[in-house]
Amino acid sequence: MLNIAVMLNEKKERVIMGIDPGTAVMGYGVILEKGNKTELISMGVVKMTHLDDPFLKLQRIFEKTVVLLDQYKPDVLAIEAPFYGKNIQVLLKLGRAQGTAIAAALSRNISVTEYSPRKIKQSITGSGNATKEQVAAMLQRLLNFKETPEFLDATDGLAVAVCHSFQKITTGGKSKTYSGWESFVSDNKSKVTGVKKATGKLKG
């Protein structure tokens, strides 16, 4: 019985999809948690720039999100919260885009978790004020990929997924919550070899 329990524990995997909602470009990233390792499955963007009707944009967001969910079958969807800026109209549009993506996930009975932009940056780089380029560079080191996407919205979507992974990673049948990048590094030194030094370049 003990061997069976160990085998089941070793097979525990979790697919996480992250989405950076937008009305022009929506970024997404998909990762696989396998034990204490994290692997990149896919990342990309959904473009709405060719559409003028705001409701057609929402329709495209919903339909494309459903397609992605059906393709990768994530266990959870992590999504970035709209940035609370001064422009109310922009906030409204982003809120609608986010809500549409959330509705798509719920239509497939997939749980959703929301993270603020600052929380995502803090989790990935150690700085809540990091630039998109710094976030992308850290993800390249962490997940060992070299290609630079045409749109940084793709790595932004990937960052949301990794942020969710950092918050609660299941190891040895027990769940542990990390408060951010530094606490994650301290417990996963072998996993982030060569990355720790890069965090020193970012100042909060």
Image (spheres, rainbow, N blue to C red):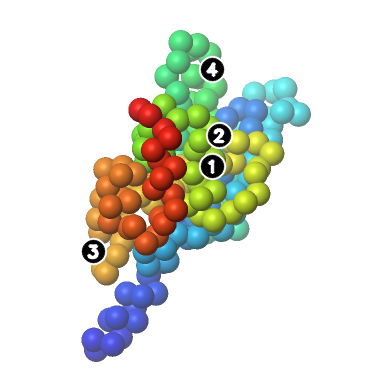
Q: Residue at x 44, y 53 (%)?
A: 194
Q: Which residue is mark 1?
A: 137
Q: Is residue 75 visible?
A: no
Residue beneath the point at 50% across and 60% down: 39
Q: Residue furthest right?
A: 50
Per the model, the C-alpha gap separating discs 1 and 4 is 27 Å
Q: How crowded is the residue under tag 4: few (<14 C-alpha within 10 Å), some, or many (20+)? A: some
Task: State how far apart marks 2 and 4 are (Cα).
Answer: 23 Å
Q: Amino acid at mark 3?
A: Lys
Does the CB distance between marks 4 and 3 fall below 8 Å? no
- Comparing marks 1 and 4, which lies closer to the viewer? 1
Q: Is residue 25 above or below residue 162?
A: above
Quarter that holds the N terminus: bottom left
**Residue 23 seen:** yes
> Where's residue 166, x and y in %?
35, 49
Q: Which residue is mark 3?
A: 174
Choose top left, top right, bottom left or bottom right for residue 90.
top right
Residue on which disc 2 sits: 133
Residues at circles 2 and 1 in contact by the CB criterion of under 8 Å: yes
Which mark is drawn over residue 90?
4
User: Label 4 amino acid?
Assistant: Val
Q: Which mark is residue 183?
A: none
Answer above or below: position of 104 versus 97. below
- Distance (Cα) linking label 3 and label 2: 34 Å
Residue 176 rendering spot, x and y as whole percentages: 25, 55
